[in-house]
C-alpha cells in the first residue's frame, strides 16, 4: 500500500492501525510510519484513499435519518 | 466570538445555543463563567495553564512529621492533618462571586493528595507538563513529599493485607478500573442528616461532646468488658470528628474575615461592598449553624463538599440540590421575596460554576476514562418525596434554567421522571436536551425505587430518597442507605469476558493469565458449551474485581478512616464507628459493567455463523481474532453485517442479552459485600469505551484492537441499530429493569432539526411516554448535528462551548479525543 501523503510503500499491516470509526464499513484509519499522517484505508482493497484531516469522515455519514442530520456538505 | 450584531433569537434559530447563552445570562454570570478554569483533561492530559498545587502536600507532610512522635491514634492524627490544611491553606474570593471556597490555592491549581497512594505520587513526579515553574524546585518538593509518603500512604498500608494475585490482575488495567481505597471513589452523603436544616456543625459538636462525656464516664466505671474496651476507639473517632468540624467552622470564618477585609479596605463599589458583607455574614453563619437563606444553604452545601474533598479524592458528587435547597429557594423567592428570580438564578448558576471548577489530581487512566471532566458530578433532580408525592419545586426549574445559561459540562443532571411530573418541568428538561447539553439524563423513578428495594432491601421511604451515587447507580441519601465509598475497581471491562473465551483466560495485551482456564475454544462443540465458558469467564472477572473491594472496605475503618465524612453521618455520630464501617451500612454495592453489549453481539455472531450456518470454523475465527482480523476484512464484515445485532427488536440476539443478564444477576446474589448485600451489575461506560480500545483484543462482533468499543450500557453499537428508535426501546424493554441489574444506560442521538419548535417537544414527549410505559430505567440524548460536530473538529476554537453526552456524563466536544468524537458522531441519529 502507498501512503497518499508521502508515497511510502509497505504492506497494509505495516501502517499502524488506529481505529475504524464505523464498524460496519471497511474504511479504517491507519498511520503512516514514515510521515505520521493519518490515512483512510479501504481494508477490502488494501488501498490508502486519502489523508484524514480534522472534520473529515471518509467512511460517510452517521447512520439514521438522512436529511435531518446534515453531514459535512459535499461528502458521501 | 459570536458576531455581536446577531440577536439571541437569530443565534437560537441557528441553534448556536452557546452564543445565545452568553448573551442571555447576567453580566455577573458571564464574568464568573469566563473566569472559571476548566479542569477536565483533554483526552488524557490536563490543559495548558493548569498546575498541580504543591501547597497542600507540603502542609500535610509537615504536619505528619510533626505528629510522628505524638501518642495520638491515626484517626486523630489524620483529623489534625486535615485541620492543619483548612487552617492554613491559601484562600481567595473571585471577583463578583457570592459563593466562596476552592480546593486549591489559586483557581488554576489542581490539588494533589500525597497521602493516598505512592503510585499516584510517582505519576505526579512524571507529569512535568502540569508542574509549577521553576521545574527543578517543584521536582525537589515533590521528591521530598513522595519520599516521605512512600510506605505510609493508604495504598501502601492496605496492600500487605490484600491478595496480591487479585491486586496484580486489577492493577494490570486489563479487566478493571482503579484501586481499592477507602478515601478514593464515590462518596455519598447522609443528606437526610445534614441538609434538612435541622442541624449544622455546632449541633453535631454538641452531640459529640455529650457522647464523649457519656462514654468517658462509662469507660471509667468499675467494669471491664469488650464493650468498655471498644469505647476507647469510639471516643477517639468522636474526637477526630469534632476536630474536623471545628476546623470547618474556622475555615469558613477565614473567608468571612477575608470578605470583610476586602469590603472595608479595598472595594470601592458600594453594591459589591454590600455583597462582600453578605458573603462574610454567610460564612459566619454556615457551616456552624443551619442555613436560613438560599445563599447560606448553597454555601453550606459547598463547604461540606469541599471539606469532604479535602479529606478524600471523590470521583463523584452525589447530590439532590433541588430537594435540599428547594425550601430555601421557595422561602426567599416566593414567600419572603427577598430574592428576585433573576438574583436566585445568579446564585444557582454560580453554584454550578463553583462545582464545575473543583479538581483533584487523578492518574492518567482516570483522566482517559473521564475525558473532558473532573469526575462524575451527576446531580439528581425531580423524583418523589418520602411519601411518594412529587418533589419538583422552583429550584428544579431554576437549576435547569441556570444550566442552559452557564453551560458547564460538569455537574450534569439526571432527572427522576415519574407520572406526576408537571408539563412545565418536562419542558425545562426538554429545553436542556434540545439545546445540546446532553443532560438531564432521564431516569424512570418508579422502576428505580422498586429496583433499590429489590437489590438492596432499602425500605420504600428510603428508596424514594435516592440520589445518583455516580453516573447511574441509585443510592438513598439516608442514615443506613448512603454509601461512603465505592472504589472504581469494581468496574468490569466486560468485553474481556468474550475475549477470554477465545484465549482460555490468557490476556495477550498485558501478557498475563487473568481469566479462567476454560477449554480451548476450538474444542467447544455446541453453542451451549461456548456460553458456559462465557459464564465461567464472567464469574471469574467479577470475582477478581469484587474481592479486593470487599477486603479494602473491611480494612478501611482502621487504616484509611474518614473523620469528616463520619462527622456528617448520623450512623457514625450515633455509633462512634467510622463511616466506612460496613456493619452500620445497609450496603449498596454494584459492579459497573463497561463494554457489555460487545458480548451480546459477539455471542450472536458466533452462534449464527459458526454453530448454526457453519460458515467458519471456531479455529478459523480464533486465528482471525488473534491476528486482529488482519487480511480477513471480508470475514470481519460478514461478522458485522450478517449477524443479528442488539437494538433491532430481534429476538435472536435479544434473547442472548437476557441469557447473559440472567447469568450475571444470579451471580450477583451469590457474591456479597461486607455489609452482606448483593453486587448487581450496572452496564454503562463513561468513556471507558475509548480507554479500553487499545486494551481489548479483536472480538467476534467485528471490532479490532484499537477500535472504540460501543458507547456503553445497553446502547446498541453505533450505527448498528438500523430499525429506528422504537425497535431500540423494544429491545431494551425485554430486560427486566428491576431484577436483571441495578440500572442500564441507554444513549440515543436525536436530530436537532426534528426537535425544533413545539412539534419537537410533542414528538419527544410521545417518545418519553413510550419509554416510560416500557419500563426502561434510563435514557439520555445527544442532540447536536453531524455538521456542527464536524465543524468543531475543523475549527475547535470556534466551538469551545459545544457540549455532547459521552456516556454517563457530558463533556465539551473539543475536550475529548478524536476517536471519542468520531465514536459519538457515528451514533445513529434516530428519527422520532
Image: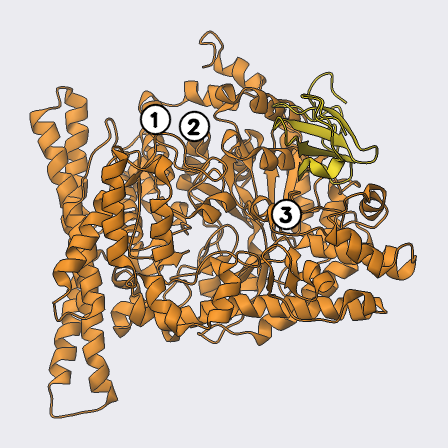
Name the one closer to the observer, B358 or B100: B358
SS category of the residue bearing label 2: helix
| Mark sitting on residue B405 | 2
Chain containing mark 3: B
Quarter-wise, where is residue B567 in the image?
bottom left
Chain containing mark 2: B
How far across and how far down the image is residue B651, in percent?
A: 82, 56
SS category of the residue bearing label 3: loop
How far across and how far down the image is residue B389, in percent?
A: 48, 54
Q: Are marks 1 and 2 on the same chain?
A: yes
The yellow-coloured chain is labelled A
Quarter-wise, where is residue B502 in the image?
bottom right
Separation (CA) of disc 1 from disc 3: 33 Å
Name the one closer to the observer, B247 or B814: B814
Whether pointer 1 and pointer 2 mark residues with C-beta atoms closer than 8 Å, the reply is yes
| Mark sitting on residue B29 | 1
Separation (CA) of disc 1 from disc 2: 8 Å
Q: Is residue B737 left or right of residue B219?
A: right
Quick one: label 2, few (<14), some, or many (20+) residues within 10 Å? many
**First of labels 1, 3 by sequence position:** 1
Q: Is residue B719 left or right of residue B96?
A: right
Observer-side mark, 3 or 2, equals 3
Find chain B in the image and tell me its colour.
orange
How far across and how far down the image is residue A37, in percent?
A: 63, 26
Whether pointer 3 and pointer 2 mark residues with C-beta atoms closer than 8 Å, the reply is no
| Mark sitting on residue B746 | 3
Rendered position, B34 above or below B633: above
Q: Is residue B115 left or right of residue B804?
A: left
Chain containing mark 1: B
Viewer can see residue B581: no
| Mark sitting on residue B95 | none
Q: Is residue B155 left or right of residue A59?
A: left
Amino acid at each position: 500500500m502507498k501512503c497518499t501523503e508521502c508515497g511510502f510503500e509497505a504492506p497494509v499491516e505495516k501502517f499502524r492501525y488506529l481505529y475504524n470509526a464505523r464498524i460496519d464499513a471497511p474504511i479504517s484509519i491507519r498511520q503512516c510510519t514514515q510521515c505520521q499522517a493519518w490515512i483512510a484505508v479501504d481494508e477490502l482493497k488494501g488501498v490508502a484513499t486519502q489523508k484524514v484531516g480534522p472534520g473529515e469522515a471518509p467512511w460517510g455519514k452517521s447512520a439514521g435519518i438522512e436529511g435531518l442530520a446534515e453531514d459535512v456538505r459535499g461528502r458521501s | 466570538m459570536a458576531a455581536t450584531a446577531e440577536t439571541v433569537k437569530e443565534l437560537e434559530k441557528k441553534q448556536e445555543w452557546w452564543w445565545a447563552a452568553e448573551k442571555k445570562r447576567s453580566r455577573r454570570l458571564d464574568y464568573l463563567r469566563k473566569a472559571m478554569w476548566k479542569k477536565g483533561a483533554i483526552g488524557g492530559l490536563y490543559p495548558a495553564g493548569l498546575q498541580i498545587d504543591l501547597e497542600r502536600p507540603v502542609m500535610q507532610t509537615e504536619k505528619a512529621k510533626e505528629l510522628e512522635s505524638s501518642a495520638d491514634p491515626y484517626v486523630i492524627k489524620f483529623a489534625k492533618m486535615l485541620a492543619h490544611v483548612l487552617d492554613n491553606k491559601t484562600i481567595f474570593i473571585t471577583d463578583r462571586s457570592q459563593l466562596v471556597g476552592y480546593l486549591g490555592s489559586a483557581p488554576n491549581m489542581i490539588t494533589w493528595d500525597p497521602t493516598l497512594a505512592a503510585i499516584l505520587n510517582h505519576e505526579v513526579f512524571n507529569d512535568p507538563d502540569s508542574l509549577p515553574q521553576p521545574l527543578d524546585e517543584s521536582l525537589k518538593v515533590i521528591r521530598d513529599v513522595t519520599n516521605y509518603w512512600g510506605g505510609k500512604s493508604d495504598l501502601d498500608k492496605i496492600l500487605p493485607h490484600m491478595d496480591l494475585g487479585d491486586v496484580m490482575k486489577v492493577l494490570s488495567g486489563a479487566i478493571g478500573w482503579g484501586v481499592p481505597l477507602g478515601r478514593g471513589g464515590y462518596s455519598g452523603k447522609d443528606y437526610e442528616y445534614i441538609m434538612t436544616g435541622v442541624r449544622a456543625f455546632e449541633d453535631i459538636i454538641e452531640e459529640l461532646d455529650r457522647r464523649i462525656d457519656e462514654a468517658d464516664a462509662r469507660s471509667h466505671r468499675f467494669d471491664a468488658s469488650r464493650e468498655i474496651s471498644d469505647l476507647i476507639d469510639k471516643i477517639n473517632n468522636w474526637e477526630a470528628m469534632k476536630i474536623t468540624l471545628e476546623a470547618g467552622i474556622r475555615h469558613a470564618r477565614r473567608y468571612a474575615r477575608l470578605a470583610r477585609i476586602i469590603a472595608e479596605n479595598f472595594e470601592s463599589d458600594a453594591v459589591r461592598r454590600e455583597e462582600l458583607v453578605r458573603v462574610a455574614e454567610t460564612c459566619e453563619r454556615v457551616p456552624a449553624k443551619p442555613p436560613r437563606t438560599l445563599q447560606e444553604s448553597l454555601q453550606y452545601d459547598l463547604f461540606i463538599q469541599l471539606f469532604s474533598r479535602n479529606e478524600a479524592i471523590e470521583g463523584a458528587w452525589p447530590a439532590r440540590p433541588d430537594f435540599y435547597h428547594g425550601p430555601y429557594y421557595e422561602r426567599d423567592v416566593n414567600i419572603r421575596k427577598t430574592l428576585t428570580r433573576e438574583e436566585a438564578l445568579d446564585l444557582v448558576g454560580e453554584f454550578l460554576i463553583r462545582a464545575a471548577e473543583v479538581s483533584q489530581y487523578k492518574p492518567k487512566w482516570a483522566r482517559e476514562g473521564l475525558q473532558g471532566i473532573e469526575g462524575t458530578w451527576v446531580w439528581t433532580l425531580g423524583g418523589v418525596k418520602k411519601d411518594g408525592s412529587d418533589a419538583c419545586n422552583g429550584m428544579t426549574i431554576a437549576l435547569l434554567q441556570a444550566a442552559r445559561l452557564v453551560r458547564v459540562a460538569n455537574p450534569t443532571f439526571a432527572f427522576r421522571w415519574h407520572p406526576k411530573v408537571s408539563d412545565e418541568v418536562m419542558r425545562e428538561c426538554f429545553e436542556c436536551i434540545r439545546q445540546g447539553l446532553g443532560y438531564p439524563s432521564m431516569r424512570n423513578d418508579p422502576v428505580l425505587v422498586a429496583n433499590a428495594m429489590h437489590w438492596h432491601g432499602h425500605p420504600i421511604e428510603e428508596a424514594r430518597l435516592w440520589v445518583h451515587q455516580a453516573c447511574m447507580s441509585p443510592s438513598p441519601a439516608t442514615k443506613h442507605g448512603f454509601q461512603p465509598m465505592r472504589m472504581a475497581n469494581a468496574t468490569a471491562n466486560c468485553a474481556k469476558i468474550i475475549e477470554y473465551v477465545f484465549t482460555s483466560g490468557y490476556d495477550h495485551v498485558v501478557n498475563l493469565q487473568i481469566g479462567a482456564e476454560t477449554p480451548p475454544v476450538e474444542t467447544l462443540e455446541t453453542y451451549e458449551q461456548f456460553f458456559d465458558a462465557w459464564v465461567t469467564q464472567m464469574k471469574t472477572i467479577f470475582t477478581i474485581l469484587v474481592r479486593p473491594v470487599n477486603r479494602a472496605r473491611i480494612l478501611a475503618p482502621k487504616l484509611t478512616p474518614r473523620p469528616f465524612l463520619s462527622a456528617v453521618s448520623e450512623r457514625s455520630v450515633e455509633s462512634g464507628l467510622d463511616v466506612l464501617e460496613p456493619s452500620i451500612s445497609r450496603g449498596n454495592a454494584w459492579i459497573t459493567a463497561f463494554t457489555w453489549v460487545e458480548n451480546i453481539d459477539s455471542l450472536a455472531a458466533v452462534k449464527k455463523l459458526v454453530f448454526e450456518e457453519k460458515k467458519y470454523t471456531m479455529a478459523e475465527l480464533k486465528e482471525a481474532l488473534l491476528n486482529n482480523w488482519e487480511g480477513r476484512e471480508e470475514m470481519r464484515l460478514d461478522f458485522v453485517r450478517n449477524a443479528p445485532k442488539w437494538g433491532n427488536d430481534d429476538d435472536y440476539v435479544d434473547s442472548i442479552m437476557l441469557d447473559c443478564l440472567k447469568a450475571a444477576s444470579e451471580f450477583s446474589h451469590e457474591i456479597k459485600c461486607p455489609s452482606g448485600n448483593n453486587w448487581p451489575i450496572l452496564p454503562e461506560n463513561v468513556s471507558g469505551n475509548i480507554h479500553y480500545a487499545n486494551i481489548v483484543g479483536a472480538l467476534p462482533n467485528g471490532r479490532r484492537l484499537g477500535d472504540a468499543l460501543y458507547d456503553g450500557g445497553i446502547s446498541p453499537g453505533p450505527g448498528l441499530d438500523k430499525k429506528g428508535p422504537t425497535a431500540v426501546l423494544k429491545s431494551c424493554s425485554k430486560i427486566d429493569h428491576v431484577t436483571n441489574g441495578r440500572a442500564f444506560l441507554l444513549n440515543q442521538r436525536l436530530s436537532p432539526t426534528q426537535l425544533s419548535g413545539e412539534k419537537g417537544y410533542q414528538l419527544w414527549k410521545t417518545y418519553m411516554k413510550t419509554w416510560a410505559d416500557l419500563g426502561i430505567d434510563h435514557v439520555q440524548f445527544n442532540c447536536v448535528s453531524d455538521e456542527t460536530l464536524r465543524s468543531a473538529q475543523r475549527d475547535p476554537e470556534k466551538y469551545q462551548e459545544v457540549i455532547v453526552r459521552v456516556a454517563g456524563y457530558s463533556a465539551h466536544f473539543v475536550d475529548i479525543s478524536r476517536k471519542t468524537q468520531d465514536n459519538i458522531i457515528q451514533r445513529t441519529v434516530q428519527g422520532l
